[in-house]
Image (cartoon, rainbow, N blue to C red):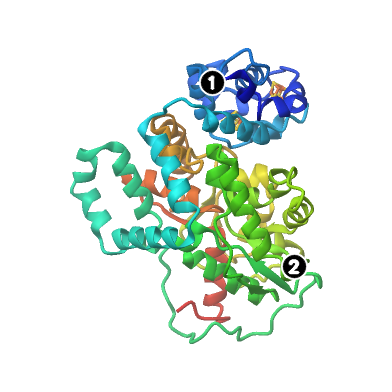
Amino acid sequence: MAISQLTSTLSKEEDKLLACIHCGLCLEACPTYVITGDENDGPRGRLYLMRAVGEGRLSNTSTAFEQHIDRCLGCRACEQVCPAGVEYGQLLEAARAELFSSAKQRGFSYRALRFALKHIWLHPARLKFAFALARFMRDSGVAGLLLKSGMARRLSRRFEFGLALLQSSSSKGGPRFKANGKHANETPRVPVQPNRNPAATSAMLFTGCVGEGLFSRVNKATARVLKVNGIQPSVPDTQVCCGALHAHAGDLAGARDLARQNIKAFSNIENLPIVTNAGGCGAMLASYGHLLSSDETFAADARRFSERIRDVSQILKPVGIKAEAGVTTERVTYDASCHLLYGQHAGEAPLEMLAAVAELNFVRLEGSERCCGGAGIYNLLEPDLSRRVLDEKLANIKASGANILATGNPGCQMQIGAGALLAGMNLKVCHSVELLDESYARAGMYSKD
Ligand code: SF4
Ligand code: SF4
């Protein structure tokens, strides 16, 4: 790889790279460093490698650079504890762009990822078809059968885990509440609580590709919960994938392409907040300002777009979440999505949303601020390290005694759900907003049918 091309992305980030003062305070916050104990699997070591590539002292095809950048979860826990304010997430994207543009032939998984990102994810009709196939596998029972029979495992562990991820997106994997059968429609039957935030009477809902493809029930729950809190959601039908998978894989051109389409899709009512229920998507959408900062046509619109992004828990907070009926006597815990916590800085808002559910038997989860190992499709690209990160999470969940785990990102739902499924744990995984939605339904405010 020629040095001139090497320096195309990381060398432009020189100021950000030089901000690191090498104090090492980030090391213990880094899940991969804690597991391997290898300095190069920690933020400081990775920053050294990035700097060496940016300065042309190390090739972006070197095994060390490839291996340790690939092994980063991108969880951004290191940013949170860094006293120098190193913008690690942006630097990681630049490093992954170096790997993406390198001429090096990479393994089958990475080549398959490139193919899917380019030939499926950038084409909404193909993506819709791919998710329809996935739902067929899940809902017809084929995925379950392959898992139960052990056939999936015999084919490969990676295939088995992929099927378990799919299976755990099923509503059967989520909490099963007893329907009381009293409600006939989604129209609120009780007076809607006065909205204390007059600026937020309407919002636009970002539904997400995985969100709409595999978790449409969560999008529906989000819309119902917004409505009952006095916020009328609209759903632009030309929206596309947020581009997080592309950005995390280093395909910045693909991510920018999707970002421009979303900015146009959400531009007809400029000032309305854009609500997401997926931490990964929300953090990506909030980074469009940075992603398109060099685009003369879109830079200003991208900045404004990013300022409008709110997680569902964040937009409900100033409105005042209605507390209604209790939903379950099973023990519930909460695991924070890294991108919700560190990317969107929503630490307390999701917990406040859960606290609005009356009679919730809630227990805090040890290590809830730690990554679950899902990290997009890291679980399929780096299965061994992902599994070790997940095992720690599952052990903490077991210790909590919880039967229901709420989180704020479909990737986390699938990762923890898949791990629990394969480990034979009695654990249902859901989105936090589903619990609030259920409490409203139980209070007779609407039907979910
Ligand atoms: S905490 Fe920040 S400044 Fe210190 S080593 Fe880590 S990234 Fe560098
Ligand atoms: S993003 Fe996460 S895995 Fe990567 S260096 Fe930072 S703390 Fe470690």
The residue that appears at 22% across and 39% down in the rendered structure is 155
Q: Secondary structure at mark 1?
A: loop
Name the quadrant where ligand 1 sits. top right
Against 85, residue 232 (above or below) is below
Q: Position of residue 165 (x, y in %)?
A: 38, 49
Q: Position of residue 212 (x, y in %)?
A: 49, 63
**Which corner quadrant holds the C terminus?**
bottom left
Residue 73 visible in rendering: yes
Q: Amino acid at mark 2?
A: Leu
Question: What residue is shown with label 2?
Answer: 272
Q: Position of residue 411 (x, y in %)?
A: 49, 49
The residue that appears at 66% across and 27% down in the rendered structure is 10
Q: Secondary structure at mark 2?
A: loop
Residue 299 vs residue 146: left or right?
right
- Front in this rendered view, residue 103 or 205: 103
- Front in this rendered view, residue 154 or 5: 5
Q: Residues within 10 Å of mark 2 (few under 14, many from 20)?
A: some
Against 108, residue 65 (above or below) is above
Against 313, residue 367 (above or below) is above
Q: Position of residue 160 (x, y in %)?
A: 29, 43
The residue that appears at 68% across and 44% down in the rendered structure is 291
Residue 1, numbered circle: 1
Residue 27 visible in rendering: no
Q: Amino acid at mark 1?
A: Met
Cα separation, mark 2 vs mark 1, equals: 45 Å
The residue that appears at 75% across and 28% down in the rendered structure is 16
Against 58, residue 26 (above or below) is below
